[in-house]
Amino acid sequence: MQKRLPKTASCAEAEPKRQRQVAAVCYRNTRAGKKVLLVTSRDTGRWIVPKGWPIDGLDDPDAALQEAWEEAGVKSADVQTDPVGHFDYDKRLADGDVTPVQAQVYMAEVEGLADTYPEDHQRDREWFSQEEAAARVDEPELKAILRKL
């Protein structure tokens, strides 16, 4: 007598295609060590790094810097051209749908912050130690990146 094995989903069905975003881990060096700039999300108020969709006409590191300007007021920074890693998360869209996202992470050493910036009335921003920043974000892969700075 032959046993029948249960059908399993194919790899393509099991994992939906992730949309690509770019993210900036904004940091500064202090006497007490590296500090990481986090912002709150607009919808839930949880702590995140600035991130967003790729921007036509900009390469990924410059698009990450543009997000850092809009969301955190980073007016000048040196950004690395190669990503240091990525993290996955589920983004809630304006219509209520959720889409899986993979954010490529670029390091940006902050040289200056603006007092006013495009989303200053929608978000809070704050400097944290590496360990504090890692504890405040939700995504495990982002936690690991922050701890390895």
Image: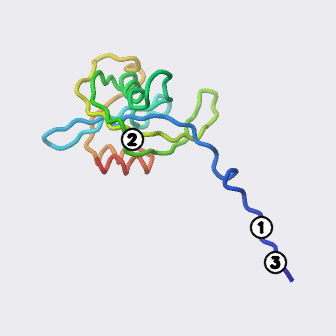
Judging by the rendered image, the residue that carries numbered circle 2 is 83
Quarter location, residue 39: top left
Q: Tell me which label, 3 or 2, sits earlier in the chain.
A: 3
Q: Which mark sits nearer the N-terminus, 1 or 2?
A: 1
The residue type indicated by label 2 comes to Pro
Amino acid at dot 1: Pro
Tell me which residue sits at (26%, 30%) in the image: 110
Q: Are there few (<14), some (14-19), or many (20+) residues within 10 Å of tag 1?
A: few
Q: Which residue is mark 1?
A: 6
Q: Is the Cβ of the residue at disc 1 closer than 8 Å to that at disc 2?
A: no
State the SS at label 1.
loop
Q: How is the image coloured?
A: rainbow
Could you say whether the residue bearing mark 2 is in a helix, strand or loop?
loop
Residue matched to label 3: 3
Please state the horizontal and vertical placement of residue 70, each as a whole percent of the image: 39, 22
In three-dimensional space, the C-alpha distance between marks 3 and 1, rounded to whole angstroms, equals 10 Å
Nearer to us: label 1 or label 2: 2
**Is 77 left, or right, of 30 in this rendering?**
right
Numbered disc 3: secondary structure? loop
Vertical comparison of 35 with 59: above or below? below
Pointer 3: residues within 10 angstroms few (<14), some, or many (20+)? few
User: What residue appears at the point 24 percent right and 39 percent down from the top-left corner?
Assistant: 35
Vertical relation: 11 (above or below) 105: below
Say whether residue 105 is left or right of residue 3. left
Count of numbered circles in the view: 3
Residue visible at 38% across and 49% down in the picture: 143
